[in-house]
Every structure is written in structure tokens, then in C-alpha cells.
Image (tube, rainbow, N blue to C red):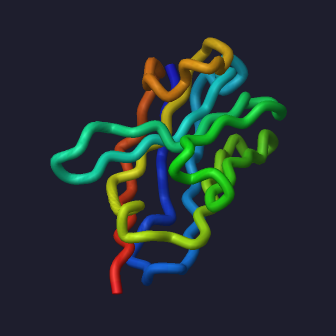
Amino acid sequence: DVQLVESGGGLVQPGGSLRLSCGVSGATLSVNCMGWFRQAPDKEREGVAAIYFGGGTEWYADSVKGRFTISQDYAKNTVYLDMNSLKPEDTGMYYCAADFLRCDSTWYLGSFGYWGQGTQVTVSS
């Protein structure tokens, strides 16, 4: 089993930055893919970014490319999402997700086996 705990959300003005963290515990050696997803009120869940949990390939939604960066500290079992140039449309609940299978081009569909409780990000002036 895998447990995920997100942190770092909050209220930020447009153009600002935030760093989200996702602590991974449990069967961490079995985790191969980590992802960040978000869901705004009255909208479907959207894939934001994904990374191979061990270093390597990263994937991003077109809406965040060039503004968000997913990274990891394997020794700390933590995955980060650095968000810059934030826009009001980035507002939503952000969820961390993990899976034992390797990431592939379908990561954005959200077929991850483990999910965190989420952290709220609000971009507003």
C-alpha cells in the first residue's frame, strides 16, 4: 500500500508562485509513476504533470507547459510541483497520485492506484 500527503497549497495573486509537495510512504520501492492532477469546481479532473519516480521523463499538460515543473527527491520520497506565473484558471484542488506501473503517454487519463487528499490552490487578486 502507498500513502500520499500533499502540502503547500494556498492563496496567491495572479503571476505569483507556489510549490506543492507530496510525501510518499509505504511501498515506495514499488512506485514507478507519480502525477499531479487538479479539479476546479464544476469541472472534470485534469492531469497537470507526471514523472517517472526514479528520475527521467516528465509529462505536462499543454496548459501548464513552461510554467509548472514537476520534480522529485527520491531520497526524501517526495515529489514537488513548482508553479510559476499562476493564473486564476489554475485555481483548484490539487491531488498527488502514484502507481506501480511506469508512466506512459496516457498518464493524463488518471489511471493511478493511489491518491492523496488534495491541497487547495486559489489564484486571485
- Which quadrant of the structure image shows residue 9? bottom left
Q: Position of residue 67 (x, y in %)?
A: 63, 61
Q: Residue at x 37, y 49 (%)?
A: 118
Q: Residue at x 50, y 19 (%)?
A: 1
Q: Is residue 73 above or below residue 58?
A: below
Q: Position of residue 91 (x, y in %)?
A: 35, 62
Q: Position of residue 62 (x, y in %)?
A: 56, 44
Extreme-top residue of the structure: 101
Q: Residue at x 42, y 32 (%)?
A: 115
Q: Is residue 69 above or below residue 45?
A: below
- Which quadrant of the structure image shows residue 12? bottom left
Extreme-front residue of the structure: 62
Taking the image as shown, residue 6 lies to the left or right of residue 32, namely: left
Q: Position of residue 13 (x, y in %)?
A: 43, 83
Q: Residue at x 65, y 20 (%)?
A: 103
The quadrant in which the C terminus is found is bottom left
